[in-house]
Amino acid sequence: MPDRFRLSRRTLAPTLIVLLLAAGFGLALFQPWKAFTNTTVNEAPPSASATAMKKPDTSTAQPSEPQYLAQGHFVAHEHATSGTARTVRLTDGGQVLRLEDLKTSEGPDVRVYLSTRDADEVKTGLGDGAVELGKLKGNLGNQNYAVPNGTDLSKFRSAVIWCARFSVSFGAANLSSAAN
């Protein structure tokens, strides 16, 4: 082999260390094994069975059962995503985003958001005023995410599965009034 392609013993060890560190960093950043794994979560509907939930009551009295406020079906963006998103008002006044029959990909830092943008607009970003509800619990199944107290759900147009690491939407669901 020509001398110009040979590594001296002095440069071989540092070169191998740099290559191993770069490979480790790449694995930590991209987490490629998540393309081949699934996490299923099956949480019960919040505080009542889904069949017991009813459409919103227009009276000012506290509801006796959780109520659907809005719902929509996921559309895929960067990853195949399907399922239903529902906003729910609990009997204690709390609010929850419920994801039902969710199917999406796992990723390195996937989170659930409410966005003031509609599902198509979210492809270019979450927009001002988006509210993070937490890390995605699983890429398959049914799960509940508490909405922070004082959040006016009527200002949000979509629920979004968002990869924070790469700033991309896996999918989003337009939230339309459940009374419609």
Image: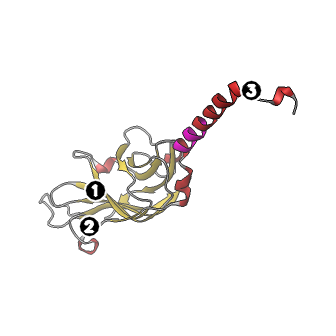
Q: Nearer the viewer, residue 56 or 75?
A: 75
Q: Identity of the amino acid at label 1?
A: Val
User: Which region is colored magenta?
Assistant: 22-28
Do residues under tags 1 and 2 come within 8 Å of each other at their CB atoms? Answer: no
> What residue type is disc 3 on?
Ser
Q: Position of residue 17 (x, y in %)?
A: 61, 33
Q: Is residue 78 left or right of residue 12?
A: left
Residue 85 is one of the magenta-drawn residues: no
Q: Nearer the viewer, residue 2 or 97?
A: 2
Please give left or right for residue 174 compared with residue 55 in the image. Answer: right
Q: Residue at x 71, y 28 (%)?
A: 9
Residue at point 33%, 47% (across, down): 155
Magenta stretch, overall SS = helix
Real-space CA distance between mark 3 and mark 1, rounded to the nearest whole angstrom: 62 Å
Q: Which residue is mark 3?
A: 8
Q: Is residue 66 left or right of residue 33?
A: left
Counting other residues with Cα less than 10 Å from the Cα at mark 2, is it few (<14), some (14-19), or many (20 or more)? some
| Mark 1 and mark 2: Cα distance apart in space | 15 Å
Q: Amino acid at mark 2?
A: Lys
